[in-house]
Image (spheres, rainbow, N blue to C red):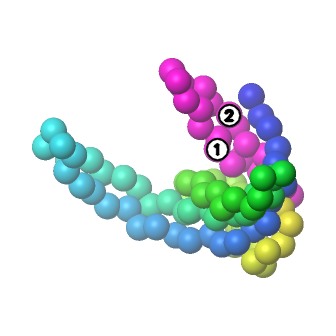
């Protein structure tokens, strides 16, 4: 399922990959990624939202040229899990 939302672009920051040991003693590795930070205006106020984006995502190049506080429309792929959901940005206008 897809949905769209309007936001104010704040920043796109690259995060290096790495590894850590979880509480069971297992080594967990994670890849490089980007963190997209935007502001969402609702009837209850303005809220900062952060989304994780893979480094090979099609929208990275488009987001790298955006200026802070420019208006953007994000399209999300919505994935449902047991008692939660995950919104993954897949397109930007």
Label 1 secondary element:
strand
Residue 18 in percent (x, y) is at 31, 61
Q: Quadrant of residue 51?
A: bottom right
Which is nearer the eye, 56 or 83? 83
User: Residue at 15% of width from left, 38% of height from top?
Assistant: 24
Residue 50 in percent (x, y) is at 60, 58
- In the rendered image, the vertical position of residue 91 relative to residue 70, given as above or below: above
Residue 14 visible in rendering: yes
Disc 1 marks which residue? 88
Secondary structure mostly seen in the magenta stretch = strand
Is residue 82 shown in magenta? yes
Q: Which residue lies furthest to the bottom in this view?
A: 67
Residue 43 in percent (x, y) is at 84, 51
Label 2 secondary element:
strand
Residue 92 visible in rendering: no
- In the rendered image, the vertical position of residue 76 relative to residue 56, given as above or below: above
Checking the image for residue 14, the label placed there is: none
Disc 2 marks which residue? 78
User: Residue at 80% of width from left, 38% of height from top?
Assistant: 3
Please report the bounds of the magenta region as a residue range. Answer: 73-93
User: Residue at 26% of width from left, 47% of height from top?
Assistant: 28
Query: Count of labels shown?
Result: 2
């Amino acid at each position: 399922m897809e949905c769209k939302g309007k936001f104010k672009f704040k920043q796109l920051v690259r995060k290096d990959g790495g590894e850590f040991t979880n509480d069971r003693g297992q080594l967990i590795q994670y890849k490089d990624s980007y963190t997209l930070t935007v502001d969402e205006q609702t009837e209850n106020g303005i809220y900062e939202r952060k989304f994780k984006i893979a480094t090979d995502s099609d929208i990275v190049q488009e987001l790298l040229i955006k200026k802070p506080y420019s208006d953007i429309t994000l399209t999300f792929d919505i994935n449902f899990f047991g008692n939660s959901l995950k919104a993954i940005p897949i397109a930007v206008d």
